[in-house]
Image: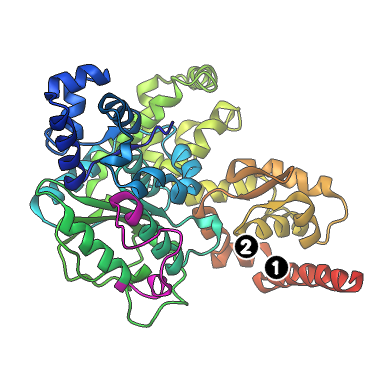
Amino acid sequence: MSDERLSLTEEERQKLTQLYKEKELTQQELAKKAGISLDTLKQMLGKKGDKDLVNKWDIEKVADALGCHPTEFINSQRWNIEKSKYTGRFQGLIEEKIRKFVGREFVFNGFEKFIKTHDRGYFTVVGDPGEGKSTVAAKYVNDHPSCLYYFNIYNDSKSRADQFLECICQQLICEYGLEDYQPDSLPQEATEDSNFLKDLLQQVSNKLKPHEKVVIVVDALEEVNLSDQQNGSNILYLPRYLPKGVYFLLTRRRELETRLLFETPQEIFDFKDYTMNSREDIKKYIYLFFEDDEFKHSLNEWIGNQNLNKKEFVETLAEKSENNFMYLRYVLPEIAKGYYQNLQLENLPQGLTSYYEDHWRRMGMQDKPLPKLKIKIVYILGVLRKPVSRQLIAKFASVKDEIIVQEVLNEWSQFLHYSQILGQTRYKVYHASFADFLSRKEIIEAAGIEITEIHGSITNALLEDLDTTEDED
């Protein structure tokens, strides 16, 4: 049995009402017979304002009490095809992002205010890498199961407009029971521009009751590949106009301002305008580590050795972080592991970029002579955007001994995401900010690296594989 939740359409509510009246049951009698609360039944019937999401198993209980199948009053396509079929690939990311979630009420309050004061529109959360934009998107999706969503994932190679359009259109058809279309066989034009999406949004808008709304969350617009889009079009072909009751919650980096033209209500919510709110959330995040069995004892010991109290530690580290959660994700575990045993708190790196520079130095990447092989391996990880095995990294780096590769992977483990694919451990860079650091001109020059050389090594290794395959044929 699915644990998904549904919101019945007005037509479906009318059918359900007709069914229980034909059975000469009151709402109280039906709720009792089904073994659910009267409030839950009223949610099902849309009598509880905008709190109308109900668990599918409660719907099944009501259907059993009426002696019928749920599809007698719920669109069969909506019932049988779960939205998760089209969003399952994002589940791991969502779970990871909200694992140590704190605060951000000021962002959600801002979005709710926008919805209350506009009958449609785009609400865009803007910030630097590591400030928590994707976490905000993930938390909203987790707390609002009826919303539609798409995450442009950094390591999945550049996201394309056709992928976004397909996924969102499938969710719309499934979630709102648009019977003229099948989510698994969209018309060809559905992914060519925004026209099909706009048509679906209008159809859904026409179905909405006055208090109902459609929210579509789209994360990380900066990760979209624009090369395949028509000139002059919005990123992902986001519609310039929106029908009533339709809202987009977008996230993007601060520097990305092109290719977004909307002639509908919009608001830019920039984290730099809410520094005090972010600082308070940063402090809450630090305190979470003092509740974590993995870190709390080591952190308290470090603070004691520094002759600090917890409040001083939290205040100073929050200032050092420059309101960047990614900084804390790296620095706090390193403090707990003793990497900064002989360093005063005030001498910790200032900000995420300085932290990367400090780790680069501590890992000996500036030693003389330069450890060019280690540098090359790290850059291969930065260039590749998909999970890659140790064996393949060794091949790209022209290294015969995989132990050398493993040593580098161990040194940079906190920046990497691990996954098991076909029995192999594969590695990829966890966050785009680290790849940004590697691409800085001064870092490339100091490392004595040619990015074209890295790409060339990868291409040559792949061509060798191709030649070998052809020889075998």
**Mark 1 vs 2: CB contact within 8 A:** yes
Q: Which residue is denoted by mark 1 in the rendering? A: 454
Taking the image as drawn, is residue 127 in sight?
no
Colouring convention used in this rendered image of the protein: rainbow
Above/below status of 8 relative to 207: above
Q: Which residues are magenta?
A: 172-195
SS state under label 2: helix
Q: Which residue is denoted by mark 2 in the rendering? A: 383
Q: Position of residue 436 (x, y in %)?
A: 51, 59
Residue type at mark 1: give it: Ile
Left or right of 183 on screen, residue 175: left
Residue at 48 percent of width and 46 percent of height: 88
Q: Is residue 183 magenta?
A: yes
Quadrant for residue 145, please give it: top left
Q: Position of residue 443 (x, y in %)?
A: 59, 62
Number of numbered markers: 2
